[in-house]
Structure formats: C-alpha cells, structure tokens
Image (tube, helix red, strand yellow):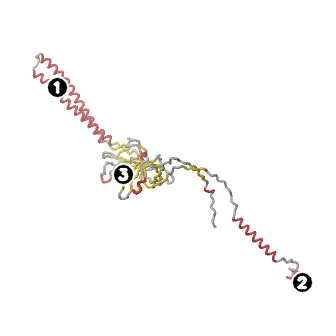
Amino acid sequence: MPLDKDALDKLKIEPADRTAGAVALPRWLGWIIVALVAAAGIAWWWFGKTTLPVVRVATAEAVARGGNSSGAVLNATGYVVARRLATVSSKVTGKIVEVLVEEGMAVEEDEVLARLDDSTVRRQRELAVSQREVARRSLQEVQVRLDEARRTLRRNEGLRADKLVSEATLDASAAEVDALQARLLALQGELELTERTLALRQQDLDDLVIRAPFAGVVISKNAEQGEMISPVSAGGGFTRTAIATIVDMDSREIEVDVNEAYINRVYPDQKAEAHLDAYPDWAIPARVISIVPTADRQRATVRVRLAFEELDPRVLPDMGVKVGFLEERPPSSEPTQTAVARIPRSAVRVPRRG
C-alpha cells in the first residue's frame, strides 16, 4: 500500500509551534528552587550524621576509704617446692619381684611400695630359728642336770655330816654343780646369740620390703618388676637405684631469689601475693617464712622462703611463680573515713576536639 505523503506532512510539528503555548518562568524563581533543593540535601546529611544522644541514668556509689593501705614493694620470681621429698630406694641389693605403686598414687606412711626377692634371706632366717631351738634344748638339758647335781650335793653333805661318805665324794658333787652352772651360763649366752642372729635375719627380711617413709604422692616410678636395685650405682648402669619418688604435698612452699640490693624490703611474716605462671589471674595469699642467711656470690641474690596461707590442689611442685611482697602500713592514731563517690566508667563522656 503506498504511503500518503500529504497526510504525513500534516502530522509534522514545527519548532515554532512547540513553544507557542509554553509559559516563560522568571530566572530568579529557578535559583530559589535550586537553593531549596540544596538546603534540603544539607539538612538531610547533617541530621543523618548527628544522632540524638541517648540519656542513661547511672547511680553513684559511696565508697568508704580508710587510712590503711597495702602495696607491692618488691617483685620476685621463683618456684613451688616441697620441703619433704624422698627418692625411695632399698638398703640392700636385690631383685625386684613386685612394685605396688604408680605415678599420682597417694600413699600412707609405712605403706608397702615394692618387694625384693627374699628366698635366700628367708632360708637364713629359718636356719637361725633352728639354731635358737637347739640352744634352747641344750639349755634345758643342762638345767635338769644341774638340778640333779644340786640334790646330790645336798644329800652328800648330809651323809658327810654323819661320816657316811668320804670328803672326796662331797668335793666331786660340789665340782659337778659348779661345772653345770658354768655350762648353763655358756648355753644362756649361746641362746642369746642365736636370738640376736634371728633378729638380724628378720631385719634382713624386713629390708627386702620397701615402705613409704611418710604420707605423700608418688610423682615418679623408677623401677619395674624383674629389675635389680641397689642403694649405690652398680652393674654398669643396668641396676636401678630407686623405686619411686614421693612428695609430701602438705610441705609445699615457695622459694624465690631476691636481689641482695633489695633484701632490706623483706622481713619474716611479711604478707605477699603469689601468681602461678599457669594461673596468672589467680592471686594466692602467702607470707614470708624465713630469709636464708646466706647470699649467692655469683648471682648476688638471697633466697627467701614463703608459705601458702591455704594449700590448693592446683599448686604443684616445680611450678613457676611470681611473688609480690606487700608493704603493710600501720593504722594512724585517729583513723578517718572519707566518703568517695564511685560512678561507672560508661557514665563519663570526654568531648572530642576539633
């Protein structure tokens, strides 16, 4: 279908016709509109950035501050130690047949820790028992003979008074009594000797049973069943010298080394605070036991012993510890109480500069 060019020309709008019906606005009105838009943008930016403060109420607390105060005057480092620590060994060399302890086990005084082979010593004790029995029977035999000799002597003395026996017979009876008395004394000595020998063999047998010297906790086990043990090093290093190591946990204390230039700040019964390296936020009350009266020439330090005010299972021997020695100020003659207002830190607002 062919296009009607005349119809298209009638639909065309000339530029002059576009602005024929428009109303022209003054220029100053445009500038006012731009200024209002800019002011609205600035106001939006300002109020969006600056928020209204939230008011919170904080309560001030009255704190009474007295005249006494204490502070650390000296800090030192050291270790937790146990005053009673024993590495338990045997008195004789022998073979271990039984070990009854493990690390961490609590033991009582005289509790059996281990046993050694006692086969030889037990036979020696049995031999001593037999020797004592033989000496006792011999003594009984001589005692019976002595009693008989004394009766014979009294009878001969009566017959001699009646001149029925000779003087030689009476003398022989008296000699027999004296000889039996001497024999009886000798056998009594032998019996005492066998009893002492038996006691010695019993002691040897008891020495093969290793016991705890005091109540404590086993911190190390040094030997096993089947090994040889000796109170001294022997056997080219294959012989054990200890069964176990026991610590008396009630004897735990602190040892620190204080520079000798500051030892004048430490005195007996001085209060202190200890902080274990394992628990740095835990303040443990302590006090000074004693100042060891000697100095280390190489390190120029003096050793100080401190006791825990209260023992705790978390405190273990050989733990590192930091100690702060406290200075106790004596109270004044007229103590005064000053009221101090304490407010939360969040209630304090510091103005920003610039």
The residue to which callout 1 is attached is 177
Mark 1 neighbour density, 10 Å: few (under 14) some (14–19) many (20 or more): many
Question: Which of 306/73 is in front?
Answer: 73
Q: Position of residue 351 (x, y in %)?
A: 63, 62
- Tell whether 13 sits left or right of 251: right
SS class of the residue under badge 2? Answer: helix
Between disc 3 and disc 2, whose residue precedes? Answer: 2
Q: Position of residue 158 (x, y in %)?
A: 14, 17
Quadrant of residue 320 within the rendered picture: bottom left
- Tell whether 18 sits left or right of 245: right
Q: Which of the two marks, 3 or 2, is nearer to us in this view?
A: 3
SS class of the residue under badge 1? Answer: helix
Q: Which of the two marks, 2 or 1, is nearer to us in this view?
A: 1
The residue to which callout 3 is attached is 293
Q: Are marks 2 and 1 in contact (CB under 8 Å)?
A: no
The residue to which callout 2 is attached is 6
Q: Is residue 250 above or below residue 137?
A: below
Q: Amino acid at mark 1?
A: Val
Q: Quadrant of the C terminus?
A: bottom right
In the image as oriented, which residue stretches furthest toward the front? 334
Q: Position of residue 301 (x, y in %)?
A: 39, 56
Between disc 3 and disc 1, whose residue precedes? Answer: 1
Quadrant of residue 131 within the rendered picture: top left
Q: Are marks 3 and 2 in contact (CB under 8 Å)?
A: no
Question: Which of 231/60 is in front?
Answer: 60
Residue located 40% across and 44% down the image: 100
In the image as oriented, which residue stretches furthest toward the top? 162
